[in-house]
Amino acid sequence: MKLHSPESWRDRRGTSFRNRQQHRFFRRYGPWAVVTGASSGIGRAIAERLANAGLNVVLVARNQSHLEELAAMLKTRYGIDAKVLSLDLSQVSADRQLAVATQDLDVGLLVAAAGFGTSGPFINATLEQEWEMLSVNCRALMAATHHFSQRFAQRGSGGLILMSSIVGFQGTPFSAHYAATKAYVQSLAEALHVELKGQGVDVLAAAPGPTQSGFADRAGMQMGATLKPNDIAQPILNALGQRSLIFPGFLSKLLIYSLSPLPTWARARIMGIVMGGMTKHRLQSS
């Protein structure tokens, strides 16, 4: 399929982009974007917003059928090109596979949304699962970020969106290791925002609160109030190139700003109470 330029996309869809922001976004971060964790949740919602802005997308996740379904929908609805890449990002070999599969594409944006969490007392955790989480949340994200940041610096423009979390700003009992992986992502994004700014590469850390997705089921958590991925995807994209950090959604801001005046030890204890409530069913059965 022929790659879309801003002009060709405008010809098919009407006289112009829907707004100047979409046009600017395409010109700076197009024509291709790579989205990991694209089969569900925030990754899927962002992929659709990118397609709506005229970007072609490389959809990366483990679930081949979900990716193919999404790719078909995006092609039909938005007239863009979409490629499916079924990878298990916990495997080191996936790093090279991602690089090779995208080497001939003019990629201008990486959205690193792949990740999962665990919960409950750390001493009760299954070590193999914790290693897998560390590999997906940190190692694979670092490898993709390193690869694409080099490419973006060479082309003189690009963007990196790294998915942090509000739990990454202090220790979080009963989700200790997951919170630690998000602290890594947050720290990496903050540093790269400074390092890469002079090379035309925008870096954003997106730190949402509890979000409706498959995350809670896999982590064994029972969430109360949650954010909807479709409600926070566009604010995240809007923040890229404008700031280094966003807490998307009212719930995220409420949680983080209510804790921010407190010392670290107090924040950790409060988060332990919150997380303890979400994992009470597991604590009682252990």
Image (spheres, rainbow, N blue to C red):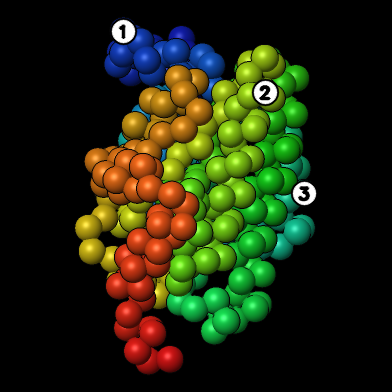
Q: Under tag 1, what secondary structure?
A: loop
If you read the primary sequence from the N terminus, does the residue marked by circle 2 or circle 1 appear first?
Answer: 1
Pick whichever, 6 or 107, lies toward us. Answer: 107
> At x 52% / y 66%, what residue is drawn?
176
Q: Position of residue 227 (x, y in %)?
A: 27, 50
**Residue 222 left/right relative to 112:** left
Closer to the camera: disc 2 or disc 1? Answer: 2
Q: Label 3 amino acid?
A: Arg
Q: Label 2 amino acid?
A: Leu
> At x 26% / y 55%, what residue is drawn?
226
**Residue 109 left/right relative to 276:** right
Which numbered marker is on residue 196? 2
Pick whichever, 240 or 44, lies toward us. Answer: 240
Q: Position of residue 283 (x, y in %)?
A: 38, 85
Closer to the camera: disc 3 or disc 1? Answer: 3
* Above-or-below relation of 114 to 125: above
If you read the primary sequence from the N terminus, does the residue marked by circle 3 or circle 2 appear first?
Answer: 3
Q: Quadrant of residue 199?
A: top right
Q: Label 1 amino acid?
A: Thr
Indicate the quadrant containing the C terminus: top left, top right, bottom left or bottom right: bottom left
Q: CA distance from mark 3 to mark 2?
A: 23 Å
Assess disc 1: are there few (<14), some (14-19) or many (≥20) residues with their C-alpha within 10 Å of its C-alpha.
Answer: few
Residue at the farthest left position = 225
**To which residue does mark 1 refer?**
15
Closer to the camera: disc 3 or disc 2? Answer: 2
Residue at the farthest bottom position = 285
